[in-house]
Image: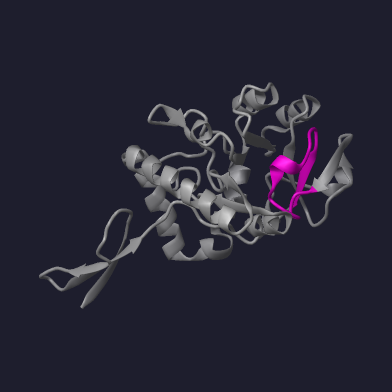
Amino acid sequence: MKKVSVFFFNLNEKSSCDRLGFCYHFHLMKLLNAGNSKTKKGEKKGWATFGIHLAPASLSGFNVCDSSSAGCRWACLNTAGRGAMSSVQKARIAKTKLFFTNKKLFLEMLWKEIAAGIKKSAKNGMQPCFRLNLTSDLPWEKIKFNGQSVLEAFPSVQFYDYCKSPERMTKFVNGEMPANYHLTFSRSETNGAIALAILRSGGNVAMVFRKSLPSSYFGHEVIDGDETDLRFLDGAGKIIGLKEKGLAKKDQTGFVLEPTEA
């Protein structure tokens, strides 16, 4: 008997075999996960975080990170933790392909899972928050289902993301994004000047440092972004300091900053 694993999203049966002896084991997939080791830190503050891991950049054949740089693609946390498992990578690729090939089904599932996450959080006495770009950079404010973005469909729920798009971040700083959507700009080796301009405008910028965090950088306070992932609680005009992890420890592009440069 030959086994073939297939990721599927809307199937009742879990396995079947064909006449050639191939048995297909279907993994019923959900879009949202209930957090990773970092997002779970927010539970101590009363927040339950749900997020989506897509296959970053063009790994799936579809680009979900239009503003990515070579440094951030190299240092991406896509393969951190459970992401190192081939089954997890296949699932992320399957989710990404579903988004681009059957967006209606993807968004219908997402709406239902968000509603379920809100209900689950209330049952557990927690506030729900959603980070839909854990390993992507999609403009969720523009993606519509039944005439509404997910931010409009759930106006009382907190959404947040990191992003590298100067245009989207500028709209956020100017108050042109939905009130329930918080963005933190991600500095890379190619957008340092833009990152500083965003800081001066009152936006927050995430920066990756090697081994330790400075107390300030270019005159702006640096807070520890590894304590929790609740970026919407950080205030304004802050640098969100992150220590390098995984492949970022070997970065030579300038994506990772030396704390002595502060």
Instruction: Give x and y (percent) for residue 226.
Output: 74, 54
> 148 or 131: nearer the eye?
148
In the rendered image, is residue 254 in sight? no
* Highlighted range, magenta: 224-242
Residue 233 lies in magenta, yes or no?
yes
Q: State the quadrant of the C terminus.
A: top right
Identify the residue shown where x is 58% and y is 60%.
Answer: 80
Which colouring convention does the figure follow?
one colour
Q: Is 38 above or below relative to 97?
A: below
Q: State the quadrant of the N terminus.
A: bottom left
Instruction: Give x and y (percent) for residue 76.
Output: 59, 50
Outermost residue on the bottom side: it is 1
In the image, is 17 to the left or to the right of 39? left
Identify the residue shown where x is 40% and y is 26%.
Answer: 147
Location of residue 4 (image quadrant) = bottom left
Identify the residue shown where x is 38% and y is 57%.
Answer: 29
Identify the residue shown where x is 63% and y is 27%.
Answer: 166
Q: Is 145 above or below relative to 27?
A: above
> 134 or 104: nearer the eye?
104
In the image, is 132 to the left or to the right of 196? left
In the image, is 157 to the left or to the right of 174? left
Q: How many marks?
A: 0
Instruction: Give x and y (percent) for residue 239.
Output: 79, 40
Location of residue 7 (image quadrant) = bottom left
In the rendered image, is residue 198 in sight? yes
Q: Is 200 above or below relative to 110?
A: above
Instruction: Give x and y (percent) for residue 45.
Output: 73, 54
> 43 or 80: nearer the eye?
43
Residue 234 lies in magenta, yes or no?
yes
In the image, is 106 to the left or to the right of 256? left
